[in-house]
Amino acid sequence: MAVEKTYQEINERIKKGRAVVVTAEELVSMVKEKGITRVTSEVDVVTTGTFGPMCSSGAFLSLGHTKPRMKMHKVWLNDVPAYTGIAAVDAFIGATEVPEDDPLNSIYPGEFRYGGGHVIQDLVAGKTVRLKATAYGTDCYPRKEIETEITINDINEAILFNPRNAYQNYNCAVNLTNRTIYTYMGMLKGNLGNAHYSTSGQLSPLLKDPNFKTIGVGTRIFLGGGIGYVVWNGTQHFPGINMDESGTGFGHAGGTLAVLGDLKQMSPRWLAGTSMLGYGATLTVGLGIPIPMLNEEVCRYAAAGDDELYAPIVDYGEQYPNFIPSNLGYVSYAELKSGKIKVNGKEVPSAPMSSYSRAKEIAGTLKQWIQKGDFLLGEPVQLLPNTEAGIKANSLKG
């Protein structure tokens, strides 16, 4: 008889301390030993994790009213501009924003760049942040400027809202040109000098539920060290990680998530401002998703190991920036994690942009939360678009 479970049944087991929870890494070996049917019956929840740079991140900050009141037109936090076209004292700080005098096109690519991601980390760490704001003044909001220092405790609401996180899969980046290039995938040496990847493979949240059978609006997640939620599909959500009957994944970057959570609950360990050499600033985000073992189909995909999951190899010297389809093939995460891969017949050293050890820690922490009854599963009110939705990518003309 086919195994079928509900969110309600699993949550009841969590409340009673009876839920069987394993990490996605543990699930891989369990299924090899016991088989899909038995493991689906025995396991209630599988936890995942990823910790890597996620540029499309930021925070809404309700800064509080001044005396007299002020309609903030321009805002800077530690000299980093924040967007203010929302309301009088509300602002959005983007992870990749940098100070206006930052040398974005610097010929010194080794320069450290402080940006929005660092502001977010400083706030979460309880550090003092310089606030500067200017305004044009109105009858109801007469004040025109302020300079002061604030901490996260001085802010009414601080909401992490990331429009695009947790890429389902991502490229293995290489460089076929004869020069070194600096990208959001790190420094890539010329003539296939190295290869970088940025997905946790068998722990990667969306690779464990590639068809979005359990992840949707309202899914409760580990976000930045606190509890967050999936609130929509992320921008550039193009699901389509094709899988054959064995569970092997081939495809492009796939789906993404828009996520939200209370910044005041989070930790600088799991929200880290990051400076990318020759590229700019970003935010490294810790994110983990629990996957309920509703049936054997869910379990089968969640049990795919590093040797069954593949990343496309893409040349960031010419192919990526010019939208040229890659013909370099695919490479398994098992090969990537071995520290060397073969591209065009050449052995190339490989290294991650994300941290697998931190991903394991996230999956382990989420497992403990659930086992203790501190974290119940959030049943989605709406599942995210999958391959059946027919979503197509668009690019700007010109």
Image (cartoon, rainbow, N blue to C red):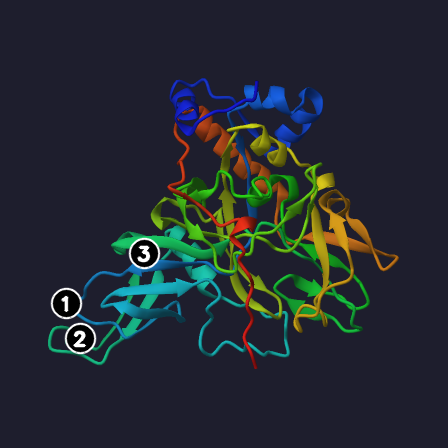
Label 2 – label 3 distance at C-alpha: 22 Å
Q: Amino acid at mark 3?
A: Thr
- Kindly identify which numbered label has been placed on residue 67: 1
Which residue is pictured at 80% across the width and 63% down the height?
A: 192
Q: Amino acid at mark 2?
A: Arg
Label 1 – label 2 distance at C-alpha: 8 Å
Q: Position of residue 79 (x, y in %)?
A: 40, 71
Seen from this angle, which residue lies furthest left? 139
**Mark 2 or 3: the one toward you:** 2
Q: Amino acid at mark 1?
A: Lys
**Residue 382 vs residue 137, the one in the foreground:** 382
Q: Position of residue 129 (x, y in %)?
A: 36, 62
Q: Which residue is mark 2?
A: 143
Q: Are marks 1 and 2 in contact (CB under 8 Å)?
A: yes
Q: Mark 1 packing: few (<14 Cα in 10 Å), some, or many (20+)?
A: few
Which residue is pictured at 34% across the width and 66% down the height?
A: 130
Quadrant of the rendered image containing residue 67: bottom left
Q: Which residue is mark 3?
A: 151
Drawn side of residue 344 relative to residue 38, left or right: right
Q: Work out which quarter of the rendered image holds the N terminus and state it.
A: top right
**Location of residue 143 with respect to 187 vertically, above or below:** below
